[in-house]
Image (cartoon, rainbow, N blue to C red):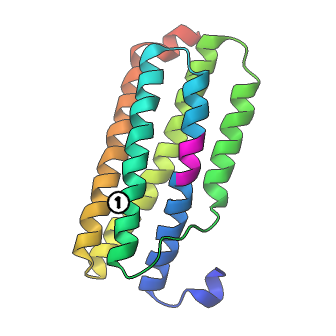
């Protein structure tokens, strides 16, 4: 979808961003599976496993939002999330020290979380502005989970992962 010609209204923009985050969440599923395989810290691995299950639920909620909006679920390429995931793959592939690798994986996961938080925050605001309160409620659940995951990752980094990497 070309931004200049296909997006004329806030509703068009809402659907475009919904398609963007739908793509991103599906890409994140694959990335999390790789990160689970690479992580050596037990709590970090468990956190990734929990977020994998949450991501599956978030995708289901996004499908509900599409349905409530009268749209078929559709993903559009998201160069931003592709870049974040590619960078994470490249960085983690270059690190031999497992403690440093865990710190890198954690930092990459937070980059993903921050992207998702910005997208969901915007989608919630737009859904409310457009009067789609049912959609806003589902999107808010996803936003709340992303924010909670980010807080858990920060706590884990500060508690031990970063110190072990020194």
Q: Residue at x 61, y 22 (%)?
A: 38
Whether residue 157 is visible to the viewer of this picture, yes or no, is no
Q: Position of residue 10 (x, y in %)?
A: 43, 84
Query: What is the quadrant of the C terminus in the image?
Result: top right
Q: Where does label 1 land, which residue?
A: 61
Q: Residue at x 35, y 59 (%)?
A: 61
Q: Secondary structure at mark 1?
A: helix
Judging depth in this view, the residue of 2 and 39 nearest the camera is: 39
Whether residue 27 is visible to the viewer of this picture, yes or no, is yes
Q: Position of residue 158 (x, y in %)?
A: 41, 19
How packed mark 1 is, by other alpha carbons closer than 10 Å (few <14, some 14-19, many 20 or more), is some
Q: Can you tell which quarter of the image residue 90 is in?
A: top right
Q: Where is 166 relative to 114, above or below?
A: above
Q: Is residue 27 left or right of residue 54?
A: right
Please, what is the dominant secondary structure of the magenta stretch? helix
Q: Can you tell which quarter of the image residue 136 is in?
A: bottom left
Q: Where is 109 relative to 1, above or below?
A: above
Which range of residues does the magenta coloring cover? 26-30
* Residue 130 drawn in magenta: no
Q: Residue at x 39, y 33 (%)?
A: 50
Query: What is the quadrant of the N terminus in the image?
Result: bottom right
Q: Can you tell which quarter of the image residue 111 is in?
A: top right
Q: Where is 47 relative to 14, above or below?
A: above
Q: Position of residue 142 (x, y in %)?
A: 34, 53
């Amino acid at each position: 979808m070309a931004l200049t010609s296909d997006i004329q209204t806030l509703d068009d923009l809402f659907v475009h961003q919904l398609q963007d985050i739908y793509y991103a969440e599906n890409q994140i599923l694959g990335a999390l599976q790789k990160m689970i395989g690479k992580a050596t810290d037990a709590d970090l691995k468990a956190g990734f496993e929990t977020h994998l299950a949450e991501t599956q639920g978030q995708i289901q909620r996004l499908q509900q939002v599409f349905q409530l909006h009268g749209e078929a679920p559709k993903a559009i390429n998201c160069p931003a999330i592709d870049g974040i995931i590619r960078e994470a793959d490249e960085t983690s592939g270059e690190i031999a020290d497992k403690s440093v690798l865990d710190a890198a994986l954690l930092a990459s996961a937070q980059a993903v979380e921050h992207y998702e938080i910005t997208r969901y925050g915007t989608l919630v605001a737009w859904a409310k502005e457009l009067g789609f309160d049912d959609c806003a409620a589902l999107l808010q659940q996803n936003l709340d989970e992303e924010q909670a995951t980010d807080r858990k990752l920060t706590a884990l980094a500060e508690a031990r992962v970063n110190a072990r990497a020194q």
